[in-house]
Amino acid sequence: MAGVHAQAIRQTRARIVSLFDPKRGNAEALAKEVGARSFASAEEAILCPGVDAIIIASASHTHANYVRLAVRYGKRVMCEKPLTENYEAALELHRELGEEAKRVFLAFNRRYDPGHRRLWERVRSGEVGDVKQLVIHNRDPFLPPRAYIEGSGGQFRDMMVHSFDLTRWIFGEEPVSIFATGACVFEDWVGQAGDCDSTAALLMTASGKIAWIAEARVSSFGYDQRIEAHGTKGMLLSDNLPQSQVKLFGPGGTDASYYATDALKLFFLDRYGESYAKEIEAFVEVVLADADAPVNVHDGLRSTYIGEAATRSFKAKRPIELNDQSLFADAAGEVGAAAG
């Protein structure tokens, strides 16, 4: 991810000044490529002259401490998700940061996917009326390595957290309940590692809006990344992206051959590469304007909270009420102890 962000930064008004990676060879190679300096510690990289902002793309368990370090030295921060490995740690970090929590940019890149963002804009415009239901499909082509799954915290915390954020963002409302379920249907070792490879969740808001999320770590036909927004005046669809836009027009005219398209994308940078670039552009603009981040620690905390509730729901085999409403006090940014 550091390499992905580095390439995106080079397309903006920003420049890369310094790099740190515990594996010095990685940092040195990237530093040489982008014309930056590599350092033996994160603190040295942060304090390098000319540094105004920090991007954290390290292992998940290191995110919180690097955020603290960067904020302590007065730097603007963009942090890859997840904010922390669990809700308790996220809550602690939120409290420590105080008002600075609104200024830390959290990298939920799917908000910047062109299709997903256009759907959100058209929902906001009222084009399809009042959106009552969301259907979100999120399936990856291949299982990640075992070491990744063993350290991910589980599919609800690691993978579905994107869909929880999309649900909150598109609805513009907080869910108040969740029922989650899952199984291992592709590889037994995933279950042995304490995780699922096929999951689903049902969320409801106080006004009765429903989101249905279906996810899998394996898809036989490539990245399956669709959002349906069903409103009182129509439905919006952010559809899958094929490897090309070529379609077959056969003698059947409007039969199935008319709709045949190329295979779907198979690599995450092919599918979401543009979203990462636009996310970096948004972060750079926030830093230049010295503005609050549009997606920040508050959003990371809420999505982490929902992920924890989903995990509890799956284990308990029952719905969980998201009744800690103090977590959702946007204006004051106040939080309270978790309930439910």
Image (cartoon, rainbow, N blue to C red):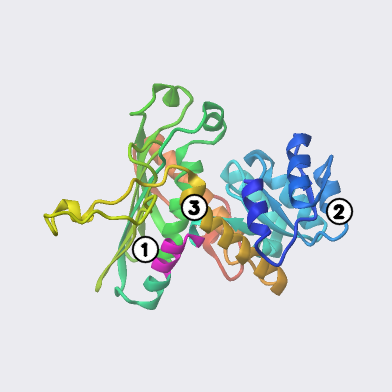
Q: Which residue is drawn at 78% across and 46% down?
A: 32
**Crowding at label 2, few (<14), some or many (≥20) Cα neighbours within 10 Å?**
some
Distance between the Cα atoms at labels 1 and 3? Answer: 32 Å
Q: Where is residue 218 in the image (x, y as percent from the top left)?
A: 38, 36
Q: Can residue 333 be seen in this view?
A: no
Q: Which amino acid does label 3 sit on?
A: Tyr
Quickly name the residue at label 1: 206
The alpha-carbon separation of the residues under discs 2 and 3 comes to 32 Å
For disc 3, the marked residue is 272
Give the structural element (helix, strand or loop) at label 1: loop
The numbered dot on residue 34 is: none
* Residues packed near mark 1 inside 10 Å, few (<14), some (14 to 19) or many (20 plus): few
Identify the secondary structure beneath mark 3: helix
Q: Which mark is residue 47?
A: 2
Mark 2 belongs to which amino acid?
Leu
Instruction: Tell me the chief SS of the magenta region.
Output: helix
Location of residue 293 with respect to 125 vertically, above or below: above
